[in-house]
Image: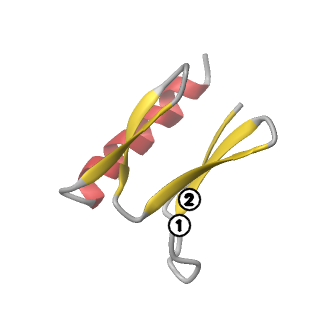
Amino acid sequence: MRLAPALLAFAALAAGASAQAKTFTNSYVSFELPDRWNCALEQTEWVCSPGAPTESPQAIIILT
């Protein structure tokens, strides 16, 4: 399962980036996002990215 290392890396990044976080949950996975990040369903995959268009993303997560 190649997705697990990416999720662990993102979880570590999210934990260090913000003291407050919100939780993303779907049928298969749950993890904490930095406050300003949002996830949206785009056809068959979830795409998570920073909420501000001017903010440089540290990571973009695509769950398929």
Q: CA distance from mark 2 to mark 1?
A: 7 Å
Disc 2 designates what residue? Answer: 49
Q: Residue at x 49, y 24 (%)?
A: 29
Answer left or right for 53 relative to 29.
Answer: right
Q: Of all residues shown, which one is farthest toward the right?
A: 43
- Who is closer to the viewer here, 17 or 35? 35
* Viewer-nearest residue: 9 or 53: 53
Which residue is the extreme one toward the top? 1
Quadrant location of the N terminus in the rendered image: top right
Q: Position of residue 24 (x, y in %)?
A: 44, 39
Residue ID at (33%, 48%): 22
Indicate which disc, 2 or 1, sits on the residue closer to the N terminus: 2
Front residue of this view, candidates 27 and 50? 27
In this view, 45 is above or below 27: below
Residue designated by label 1? 57
Residue 12: image quadrant is top left
Residue 62 lies, in percent from the top left, at 65, 42
Q: Is residue 31 left or right of residue 44?
A: left
Circle 1: is it few (<14), some (14-19), or many (20+) Cα within 10 Å?
few
In the displayed structure, would residue 56 be above or below residue 40?
A: below
In the shown orientation, is residue 19 left or right of residue 63? left
Q: Amino acid at mark 1?
A: Pro
Quick check: marks 2 and 1 in contact, CB under 8 Å? yes
Residue at 52% across / 36% down in the picture? 6
Tell me which amino acid carries mark 2: Ser
Number of numbered tags placed on the structure image: 2
The vertical placement of 1 against 54, above or below, is above
Tell me the element at label 2: strand
Q: Which residue occupies the foreground of this view, 44 or 7?
A: 44
x, y percent for residue 49: 56, 59
Q: Which mark is residue 15?
A: none
Percent x, y for residue 34? 35, 56
